[in-house]
Image: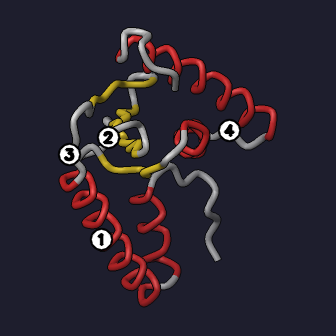
Amino acid sequence: MKSVKGLSDIQDFFNWMWAVDPLLASRLNNWHDYYRRACKQAARSVTTYGDFSFTVDGRYRVDVKGDGDGLGLFHINGTDSTAISWSSSEMALVLEMTTHSVAVKGIYTAEGFIGEYQRLLVLYRAAFQVATAGECDA
């Protein structure tokens, strides 16, 4: 079996999976397509007053929907602003951002993960404060 070390995004994972098990890769690809369509539909369907977006670390766009109950995380360097996740809390959103970031950067230690989480949390809170002119709490 080939090593999975060094996979940095979903496309790398699918390329590896096609080499390992084409049948499973086909099924996973279909599920991933369904997930992406669902994320895009969710992003289009949630349009309430007060929506805004901001950028974190020059790589991630956060969309805030409504009263802050819907936080969308998008990878802005992807080919189509790929949706990473939708969360209802700052903690979950920054955790998803960190998980993506450590995979891309190749961080493999708990200390590295914690450091990256802290770094992104500070950047997230600063960007949120700028986007809301300091009027809202994250």
Q: Nearer the viewer, mark 4 or mark 1?
A: 1
Q: Position of residue 6 (x, y in %)?
A: 58, 51
Q: Which residue is mark 3?
A: 47
Q: Amino acid at mark 1?
A: Asp
Display coloring: secondary structure
Q: Nearer the viewer, mark 4 or mark 3?
A: 3
**Quadrant hosting residue 1:** bottom right
- Is the Cβ of the residue at disc 1 closer than 8 Å to that at disc 3? no
Q: Amino acid at mark 3?
A: Thr
**Quadrant hosting residue 103:** top right
Please state which of residues 8 and 49 is positioned toward the viewer in this rendering: 49
Q: Which residue is mark 2?
A: 65
- Is the Cβ of the residue at disc 4 closer than 8 Å to that at disc 1? no
Give the residue displayed 74% in from the left and 33% down from the top. 114
Disc 4 or 3, which lies upstream in sequence?
Answer: 3
Q: Residues within 10 Å of mark 3 (few under 14, many from 20)?
A: few
- Is the Cβ of the residue at disc 3 closer than 8 Å to that at disc 2? yes
The dot on residue 107 is 4
